[in-house]
Structures are given as C-alpha cells and as structure tokens.
Image (cartoon, rainbow, N blue to C red):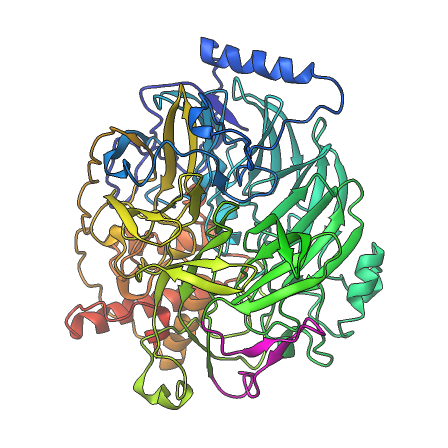
C-alpha cells in the first residue's frame, strides 16, 4: 500500500538494528511492519498548489491539437523570462539537457552559492543508496525521486516540503536489482505525475496532492528479476517505460500504457522467447533469424531497456536503447550459432501508437563485452554533407559516438570518443564494427578498452545547439575479462558467464595482456565532442571515476558533479574550469535549472549509490564524510555549503573463533559469496554503503542464518536467499567469512582488497 504524507516531525520507526546510527534525516522501516506503517494524510492545498491546478485546467481547455511551443530554440533572450520550467526528463522533447537561460554566466559565476537544500529522504535500515534522478519543476513546484522510488514535492523557491509519495516498494525486490533501488525521475503532463516503481509497477499520481490515481503492473513476469529504475516517457496518449535486469534473468522489453487508465497499449520484446512459444510480432521473427535454436532461453537472454527512451513527437516514433545480453559472451548465450543476437545492444525505433518496428541499428553485434546501448539519446537537427538531417546521437558503452538519421535509421557517422581496443573502426558501408582479432576471452583472459562500465554509462550527456557540441561524461579504463566454461541458471542472481570485473591496477603477471595498449587508467573526463566533425574539441582535467551527468545552458556554462563532492562549472566553448563548490557528497545525477520570479536556480541530487554502493570509488567524498541523500539548489548570492559530518567507522568487533571446515568448503563459500553477496557487500570491508561482513558483531553472527535464509531484514532490502541457497551453502558462506576474518586479523587487519578479485 502506498503512503502519502505531508510534513511531519518524524518518519522514523522501529528497531534500528545492530550498529545503526540515527541521523535526523533518516527514516527506518522494521521488517514485516509495512502494513502497520501505512498512513495517508490529505493535505490542504496552499495557494501555490492551487495555482498549479488552475494552470493544468487552463491547459486542458486549450483547443484540440494545441501544442506548447518548444523552448529549446528560443526566439527571444531567455534571461528576461520570469519563469522557465523543466517539465521533461531531458528538458524538452529533444532531450538535449540544454536550458535556454543565461542569468548565471561566466561573469558572475563566483557569486553562485547554496539557495537551499533538502535531505529528508526515506531510508530503510542503515544503507544510503544515493541519487540518480533529474528533478522536474512545474508551476513553482519541484518533483524529484529518491531510493525505493519515493517521490517528493517541494516548493521550488524555498525547498519547503509539500508532500511525499512512498509507493511502499517490496523491500525484498532489492535482491533482484543489479545496481540498487535508485530512480531516475518521473514524467509529468496535465497535473499528473507518472512514476516507475522498482518492484515492477507504474503509478499515476495527482501532482497537487500526491495521491495515487491508478497503478498497473509494468513488467511481464514477476518471477523474473525485472527492476524499474528509469524515468517514464510520455508518448502521445501513452506512457512508455522499460525495466532492468539484463545481467540476471530477464527477457528485455519496453511497453506503452494508456495515460488515463494504465491499461497496456503494446509491448515490444527485444529478444525472442523459446521457439516453441512462437513469435509475438514480425520484429521478433526478424530477430529470431539471428539466434540459434539452443540459445539460453531459460536465462531470458537479457536486452533490458532500463533507461534510455525518447519520444519524437514530430515523427511519432519512440526510440529505445537496448542493453546487453545474458550470459554476456555469445559462446555461452548462443553456443552453436553465435549470431548478431538482435536486438541486443541496439537502438530500435517503433511507432508510438502501435509499437511496430520502424528501424533498428545494432551498435555492437554479437556483443561479448556487456556493451549495451542504454545510454541517453539526444535528438537534434544537424547538417551532414550540406544537407539538413534529423538525427539521433548516442555515446554508448562500446566507446563509439553514433549519429543516426532518426527518420530512416541510416548511420551517418561513428567514431571513437575514448580509447577503444575491441574494434578498429566502424565500416560505414555495412554499419558494422570491424573487430580486432583474438579478443575472445573464451580460452584465455583479455584486457579490453573500454571496461565493462563503458566509455559512457547512465550519467547523461548534453548538447548545446548554440555551440553545436555534445558534452560527454567519459569513463576511461580498461578491464581484464575472464571467461567461464558454462553458466548454471540461478534465479535473481548474476548469470553473466564471466568472472568478476578486474580493473587496474593489474597484476604484474598480466603484463603481456596490456602490451601495446595505453597505460591503464581509472578516471573520468568531460569531453566536448563535435558530432559533425566527429572529434574532441576540448576535454577537462581528469576527474574521479564515475563522474556525474551534464547540464549546458544558453549562458555557455556546463554544470557537472563528481564522486569527490565537487560541483564543477565549465565554460562551454573552451572548457575552462570557472567554479567549484565542495558539497562533501558525491554527485552522480545530472543537474537541471529553472527560473522563478526572474531568478535562476540550478539543482542537482547528491548521494553516492547504484553500482558504486558496494565499493566507493577512489577519491569519493564518501571516504571522508557521511553519504546522506541530498538535493542541492544553487543561485547567485547563495550561501556556502555546510559539509556533512565526518565519516565514522563502525566500532571494531571481536574476531570470531575459526570454524573447522575443509578447503573445499571454504572455497565453495568464497565462490557463493561472489555470486550472491558481492554485488552489495565489499570484500574485506573495503569502504562501501552496505554492512561490512568482515566486522560482524557476535549478535550478527548468531543471527546470520536468519538474515540470509529467512529474510529477517527483507523490508530494508536484505531478502531471503533460501530459493537459491541450501543450508549447507549458507553455512559455507558463513564459514568463509569467519575464517577469512581470522586470516585478515593474522595479516594485521588490513583491508587489502578493493574488489572481490583479490580472493585467490
């Protein structure tokens, strides 16, 4: 049951659990008490929300066919506007993340300071799971999401909380999430907000009151590991959304639902089902030709559409970026045929009304490297070879920047925007990458650029029609890929078919694997990319790994956060670093901007989470400070940012007595730990968001089996593993943790590993 509540003195409750430190902004939820916590409170509409309702009513009375003029290409100086709203995830229909406002400029950027902040996020248990979303601002109200798909409404000028909508997502669903229970935002239209909920629901919410209007199931199979973390998109009369899970056991899809009723309008599957189940559409019949008969139908094959969806109202097309396959390597996913495996790692364009396939382009055919195409896509009108073209641009994980004619799917250009060693180039005649020989890691390990994290990940890039440049948060690192002999399907677990991600520094014994390659690095960089010339115009200094998304404005400013907690402002034409603000909290989410009463604000959600929760990146602010989810809003003449409290190491617990087990049991416990636990719990207590299993209290050791096998903390995200682990398995994991803790103490209690790769 969902909960909507107005301002209250506390949303804390229940036993905090071992080692819990209560902070003023946390809300904790005891396991199995969610039904008791359901409370709903109708708030009185203040004048601001009443204005929002009146505005929506006036919009509803506009003549049929009336459209709001696009603001991405203004005809008058926007600095004079008294109000600039951010009503869609990427600002406008083109999803360029370009805001036509210039009040904040290079001349006055030194005056930028904190206007207000919000840090009263819902937290279950002890884990801060970070932020990834883009806020919206409509009629003076800001709407943004946090972990567990909770939606917040605040006064955009003051930060005053108006209401909070908690969909009460199933806590145990966190086990199905490859990359945590974050949320990338909501869609808005005519007074209604549309929210994807991590446990597979799509909710329509009254923007004025926070009350739910309708709810529908948005995933096709609840027995699989679908997780909804992306922002929905409005496409005509429909809401379109997909789901993650492509590293676990899902059959990828995205679907459209009627805006008024929530009824499903159509569904587009990105990979076939088993042959005996037949083909739902001609698109699946086309895709099946690229698969063998003995593909791993049991695992689902992947192809998740977890993030990038764009609606083109001019062409009435929906574009979707499709993710990687599962297992990752073709020789395990499609063992006898090893075909292109459509529509994995591809961009597909479908009719927004029917879901009918119009065109597709596969960025990485026969993907072996987890190079999905789920990164954000930008629409633009560019000139190629002297002709105006309507284009779609994407910088996916594989390291190439693609410009595609969005009407026809024709590839216009594709050049590497970062170091690429898996392919020499893209053949413009065939549209296919030309692979470099001997990069299959089936028989022996290989070091490949970019890493499994990609040259660009979910953090959105931006495009300025003024500078005609794309600004890409680039990741620069290689990875050592190690293959497996086979994959035994495990529900709600990683079924990747390759070893753990091994990133620099590499072992000296791997010198032959990196011979002739660039010096291994692990860092981020902001690049200004010319999409027509296909070249880098400038790039920033190196930033810490996993830097944040990007905003660019009419004032030629670029705003970007980073894991080190620094909010950076660059000059868009030269790349000059103009301003840094130390927030003390990692910022991965993309900034946005808006104006109220003629005053410009810049907002960004902070908090380290997602795939970086288990192991905080090097130089991340979370090594020094606590990591509370926080919304920062800046303006000219604002205040300094008060840094969060210093990070407090948990009290050191006594070393347990060793357990007498065989080497085989210990090794099996280590392997089971990697496959089932290492997504969240770091090896040997390397700094991360989740409890350190190498520092468990005697009480935690006593309750270990209940936690792991009975789901005592399921509502906080720690689900039962009884469906995939036997009691012997659980005891083997516990024995591994105990005896490795003893070994660690004998070595001097040094947390020598930063990744589970060090267990060998």
- The verdict on residue 454 being magenta is no
Q: Can see residue 304?
A: yes
Q: Nearer the viewer, residue 700 or 584?
A: 584
- The verdict on residue 425 being magenta is yes
Q: Can see residue 224?
A: no
The structure residue drawn at horizontal position 60% and vertical position 60%, both measured from the top left corner, is: 323
The magenta span reads 419-445
Q: Residue furthest front?
A: 386
| Residue 680 placement: quadrant | bottom left
Residue 662 at what x, y percent from top left?
Answer: 36, 79
Image quadrant containing the N terminus: top right
The structure residue drawn at horizontal position 78% and vertical position 53%, both measured from the top left corner, is: 357
Residue 265 at what x, y percent from top left?
Answer: 77, 38
* Location of residue 57 with respect to 372 vertically, above or below: above
752 relative position to 735: left or right: left
221 relative position to 41: left or right: right
* Location of residue 461 with respect to 26 vertically, above or below: below
């Amino acid at each position: 049951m969902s909960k909507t509540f107005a301002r209250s003195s506390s949303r804390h409750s229940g036993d905090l659990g071992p080692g819990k430190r209560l902070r003023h902004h946390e809300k904790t939820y005891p396991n199995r008490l969610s039904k008791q916590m359901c409370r709903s409170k109708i708030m009185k509409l203040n004048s601001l929300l009443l204005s929002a309702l009146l505005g929506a009513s006036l919009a509803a009375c506009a003549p049929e066919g009336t459209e709001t003029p696009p603001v991405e290409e203004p005809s008058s100086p926007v600095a004079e506007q008294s109000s600039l709203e951010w009503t869609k995830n990427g600002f406008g229909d083109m999803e360029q993340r370009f805001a036509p406002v210039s009040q904040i400029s290079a001349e006055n950027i030194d005056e930028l300071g904190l206007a207000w902040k919000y840090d009263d996020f819902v937290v279950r248990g002890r884990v801060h799971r970070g932020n990834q979303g883009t806020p919206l601002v409509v009629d003076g109200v800001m709407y943004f999401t946090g972990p567990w798909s909770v939606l917040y409404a605040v006064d955009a000028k003051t930060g005053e909380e108006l209401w909070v909508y908690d969909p009460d997502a199933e806590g145990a669903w966190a086990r199905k999430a490859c990359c945590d229970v974050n949320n990338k935002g909501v869609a808005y239209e005519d007074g209604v907000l549309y929210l994807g909920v991590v446990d597979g629901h799509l909710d329509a919410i009254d923007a004025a009151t926070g009350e739910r209007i309708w709810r529908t199931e948005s995933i096709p199979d609840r027995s699989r590991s679908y997780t909804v973390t992306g922002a929905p998109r409005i496409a005509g009369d429909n809401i379109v959304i997909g789901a993650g899970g492509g590293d676990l056991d899902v059959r990828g899809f995205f679907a459209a639902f009627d805006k008024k009723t929530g009824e499903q309008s159509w569904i587009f599957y990105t990979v076939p089902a088993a042959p005996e189940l037949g083909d739902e559409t001609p698109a699946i019949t086309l895709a099946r030709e690229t698969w063998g008969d003995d593909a791993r139908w049991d695992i689902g094959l992947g192809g998740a559409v977890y993030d990038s969806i764009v609606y083109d109202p001019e062409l009435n097309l929906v574009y979707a970026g499709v993710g990687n396959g599962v297992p990752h390597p073709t020789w395990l996913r499609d063992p006898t045929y090893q075909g292109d495996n459509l529509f994995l790692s591809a961009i597909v364009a479908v009719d927004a009304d029917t879901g009918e396939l119009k065109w597709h382009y596969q960025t990485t055919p026969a993907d072996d490297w987890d190079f999905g195409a789920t990164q954000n896509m930008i629409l633009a009108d560019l000139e190629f070879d002297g002709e105006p073209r309507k284009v779609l641009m994407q910088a996916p994980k594989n390291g190439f920047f693609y410009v595609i004619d969005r009407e026809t799917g024709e590839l216009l250009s594709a050049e590497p925007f970062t170091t690429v060693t898996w392919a020499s180039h893209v053949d413009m005649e065939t549209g296919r990458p030309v692979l470099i020989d001997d990069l299959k890691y089936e028989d022996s390990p290989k070091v490949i650029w970019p890493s499994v994290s990609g040259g660009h990940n979910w953090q959105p890039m931006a495009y300025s029609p003024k500078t005609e440049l794309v600004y890409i948060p680039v990741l620069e690192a290689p990875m050592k890929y190690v293959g497996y002999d086979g994959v035994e399907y495990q529900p709600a677990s990683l079924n990747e078919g390759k070893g753990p991600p091994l990133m620099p520094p590499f072992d000296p014994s791997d010198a032959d694997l990196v011979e002739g390659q660039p010096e291994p690095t692990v860092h981020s960089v902001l690049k200004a990319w010319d999409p027509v010339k296909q070249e880098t115009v400038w790039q920033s200094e190196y930033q810490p790994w996993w830097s944040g998304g990007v905003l660019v404005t009419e004032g030629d400013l670029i705003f970007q956060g980073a894991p080190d907690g620094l909010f950076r402002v660059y000059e868009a034409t030269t790349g000059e670093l103009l301003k840094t603000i130390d927030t003390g909290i990692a910022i991965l989410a993309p900034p946005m901007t808006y104006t109220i009463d003629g005053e410009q604000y810049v907002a960004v959600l902070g908090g380290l989470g997602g795939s970086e929760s288990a192991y905080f990146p090097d130089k991340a602010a979370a090594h020094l400070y606590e990591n509370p989810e926080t919304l920062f809003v800046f303006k000219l003449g604002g205040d300094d940012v008060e840094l969060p409290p210093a990070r407090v190491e948990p009290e050191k617990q006594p070393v347990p007595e060793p357990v007498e087990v065989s080497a085989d049991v210990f090794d099996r416990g280590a392997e089971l730990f990697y496959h089932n636990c290492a997504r969240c719990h770091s090896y040997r207590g390397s700094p991360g968001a989740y409890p350190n299993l190498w520092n468990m209290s005697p009480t935690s050791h006593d309750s270990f089996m209940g936690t792991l096998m009975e789901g005592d903390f399921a509502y906080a995200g720690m689900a039962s593993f009884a469906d995939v682990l036997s009691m012997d398995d659980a005891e083997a994991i516990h024995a591994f943790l105990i005896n490795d803790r003893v070994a660690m103490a004998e070595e001097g209690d040094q947390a020598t590993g930063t990744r589970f790769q060090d267990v060998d």
